[in-house]
Image (cartoon, helix red, strand yellow):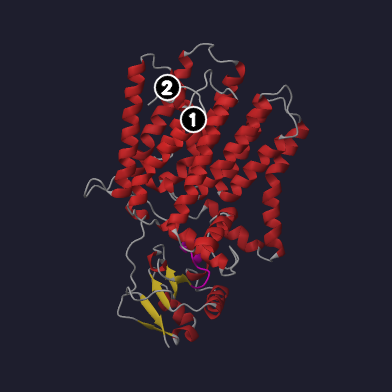
Amino acid sequence: MLRFFQSYFSYLYVALLGLLVLIRMPLLLNSFPLLTPELNWMIVGEQINQGDLLYRDIWDSVSPLSALVYWGIDSLFGRSTTALHAAALLVSVFQIVYFNYLCNNRDLYPDRTFWPGLIYMLFMHISYDCLTLSPVLMSTSFLLLAFGTLIRQMDRRGVTDEVFEVGFYIGIAALFYLPSALFIIWMMLSLLFYTGASFRQYSLSFFGFLFPVAATVLFYYLYDSLDDFNRNLLASVFRVRQYSLSDFQSLLASLLIPLGLGILGFLSLFNRGNRYVNFQQRIQQIMALWFVIAVLTIGLMPFLAPMFFLSFVPPMAYFTYFYFEGIRRVWLAELTFLIAFVLVLLLFYQGALGLIPGAELGRLSSLQVQPSPLPGDIRNRHVLIIGEDLSAYRYNRLATPYLNWDLAKYDLKNLDNYEAVINVFDHFRKDPPDYIVDREKVVEKLFQRAPALASQYEPTSVADVYKRKN
């Protein structure tokens, strides 16, 4: 496979994308589990489509541009995981093609080859949750655009005012996935150490980063929702942990081969002498810096899952190339890549399709939507879930703004505060739920604090489920 993609002809783009479709084809023909984050994102898009304002009327920590995309998908297709996966495929195609284009047309390596695109494509399949349209996937596209603009500046004799674009792309990336804002450090250090940028150009690049962020802040200010924006997005990134993923074995297994090959490729550079020109050496250092910043984003992730490590793919794919390039025996390089290829896809298919009955490795069971506690005949009703489990929303709609439990705690876990009780009462009055699923045992206290609500609901035969009286 490496020998086939070693040359650089345009028709290999067709072969590369054909291989991408071939890898994903078994999942198109078989259903695989719906993930809680996917359900969460579809609910956000649905609520915005109903006229709700994110952060004010929908308490969730998803970044604004990602929510805008989910709103667009819901407007066109409704709640559709197929639409999410199809859109993710298009984004993946863009990243693979663009990364391969950068590596070759900007001479990031000594030789022109389709290996960068092939490796990048493989690493995008470390787990089946990477197939969905996650905020990280969309954000990484703009980080790649920032990288492309940055190396275009480095390839010139002097830095131009196009550095504004680098900051702008990172600002857009942050509005898709807030932890990507840390890449402003990557941009500033890259400009400082590897270009001849002036203070004016530093300022221009930083203004480019602030421009889309400031426009978003202004939007929420004009809608008198700046406090909601700050609490539900800016402040939440440091403390909100939306779901609990205890399947660390699957996470480590997914990252083992990409990280291992990337590290081996990085270490192999120390044995190459002066084979690479100064420009290529600077690119290597910039990519190493990218990896360090990506590591820093781990502490800001809303939960740990392979999909949130997609921002690691560009540096891992970049350095992995050097590992295979350094293997002198062609047959050994082919065999090593084939083993890595098969192992990655085996874990990928095991997670999505459960090839090995009873094996949980790669399944991400704690992120899958579980069976609903509500009877199956209850559909298209307004429901409030108090807790992390969103399964009852699968065939029902959200009532009240309390989607993210970590954010809902501001009110629902603070019922000794008079203002919190008033807030809950007002939300119930504006959008009364037909059913309440109380996973956190707060409804009894809520009814004690607000007797007017208690008179409207009655317990059902299902534990912790309350029904609105007719």
**Residue 205: image location, x then y, percent:** 71, 38
Graded by Cα atoms within 10 Å as few (under 14), some (14 to 19) or many (20 or more), the crowding at tag 1 reads few
* Quadrant showing the N terminus: top left
Q: Is residue 196 visible?
A: yes
Say which quarter of the image contains residue 379: bottom left
Q: Secondary structure at mark 2?
A: helix
The answer to whether residue 435 is above or below residue 33 is below
Instruction: Inspect the image, locate mark 1, and give the three-letter code of the amino acid beneath it.
Output: Tyr
Q: Determine which residue is flagged by label 2.
A: 323
Q: Determine which residue is flagged by label 1.
A: 11
The magenta-colored residue range is 399-408
**Residue 274: image location, x then y, percent:** 54, 11
Q: Is residue 235 visible?
A: no
What secondary structure predominates along the stretch shown in magenta? Answer: loop
For image coordinates 53% across by 75% down, the residue present is 424
Say which quarter of the image contains residue 150: top right
Is residue 404 shown left or right of residue 25? right
The answer to whether residue 194 is above or below residue 422 is above
The answer to whether residue 323 is above or below residue 247 is above
**Residue 59: image location, x then y, percent:** 54, 64
Residue closer to the observer: 118 or 365: 118
* Quadrant showing the C terminus: bottom left
Graded by Cα atoms within 10 Å as few (under 14), some (14 to 19) or many (20 or more), the crowding at tag 2 reads some
Is residue 380 shown left or right of residue 103? left
Residue closer to the observer: 347 or 116: 116
Q: Is residue 391 magenta?
A: no
Closer to the observer: label 2 or label 1? Answer: 1
Instruction: Inspect the image, locate mark 2, and give the three-letter code of the amino acid beneath it.
Output: Tyr
Question: Residue 59's mark?
Answer: none
For image coordinates 43% across by 47% down, the residue present is 131
Give the Cα distance between marks 2 and 1. 25 Å
Is residue 167 shown left or right of residue 336? right
